Amino acid sequence: MPSNVSRKQTNDLIQSKIYTKDTIVQQLSIWRFQKKKIVFTNGCFDIVHRGHIDYLAKAADMGDMLIVGVNSDASVKRLNKGDARPLQDEQSRALILAAFSFITAIIIFDEETPQELIQFLKPDVLVKGADYNADETDKQSKKYIVGSDIVRANGGVVKTIEYLEGYSTTAIENKIKGK
């Protein structure tokens, strides 16, 4: 940390990267005016691990500004990730991600999918893990990337990133449980 930046200023900087749809509107306009390439990805990010860092860093390399959509606590529950999930509340998960220098903005969303948020943001690049298929057009397929149609209709691209093998929240959860 630079000596001229106090801890309070650093905490304020991290907190300032957490937006709502209302508060990011002006920032989106500035980035678009500056011709910045906006990348979007999303997830629960319940226990941030090496696999997440690898994935998010690669996503950030695909453009100038990385916006991460974080599932709200309620939407994590609806995803049936387990009775104990999320392990951390949405504000904590957002704050942890905002601390990464390569992440530009965080938005918590409450819907089951980020479809509405993607429609609002209109990113230049939409990124998901390689367990999805960037070319899948059947919205009923488990491989379909939600919002890919919106991104392409606006001239953007959809990409996937291979996961770092051996790193997942489920694997960590199982290890803690002694499984």
Image: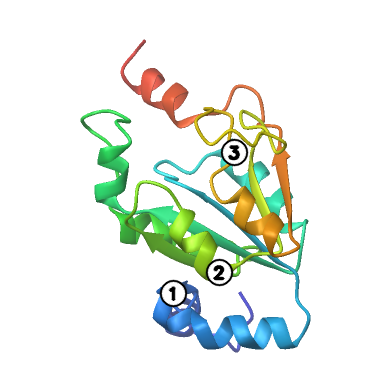
Graded by Cα atoms within 10 Å as few (under 14), some (14 to 19) or many (20 or more), the crowding at tag 1 reads some
Image location (x, y in percent) of residue 43? 47, 46
Graded by Cα atoms within 10 Å as few (under 14), some (14 to 19) or many (20 or more), the crowding at tag 2 reads some
Image location (x, y in percent) of residue 24? 49, 80
Q: Nearer the viewer, residue 113 or 36?
A: 113
**The disc labelled 2 sits on which kind of residue?**
Leu
Above or below: residue 170 compared with residue 86: above
Q: Residue at x 29, y 31 (%)?
A: 80
Please tell me whether mark 2 sits on a helix, a strand or a loop. Answer: helix
Between circles 1 and 2, the one closer to the viewer is 2
**N-term-proximal mark, 1 vs 3:** 1
Between circles 1 and 3, the one closer to the viewer is 1
Above or below: residue 175 compared with residue 94: above
Q: Are marks 1 and 3 in contact (CB under 8 Å)?
A: no
Give the residue at mark 3: 50
**For the residues marked 1 and 3, what is the alpha-carbon distance in whole angstroms?**
25 Å
**The disc labelled 3 sits on which kind of residue?**
Arg
Above or below: residue 64 compared with residue 96: below
Q: Quadrant of residue 23?
A: bottom left
Q: Is residue 131 left or right of residue 45?
A: right
Q: Residue at x 50, y 78 (%)?
A: 10
Q: Residue at x 53, y 59 (%)?
A: 68
Above or below: residue 25 compared with residue 119: below
Examine the rendering and report whether any part of residue 86 can be seen. Answer: no
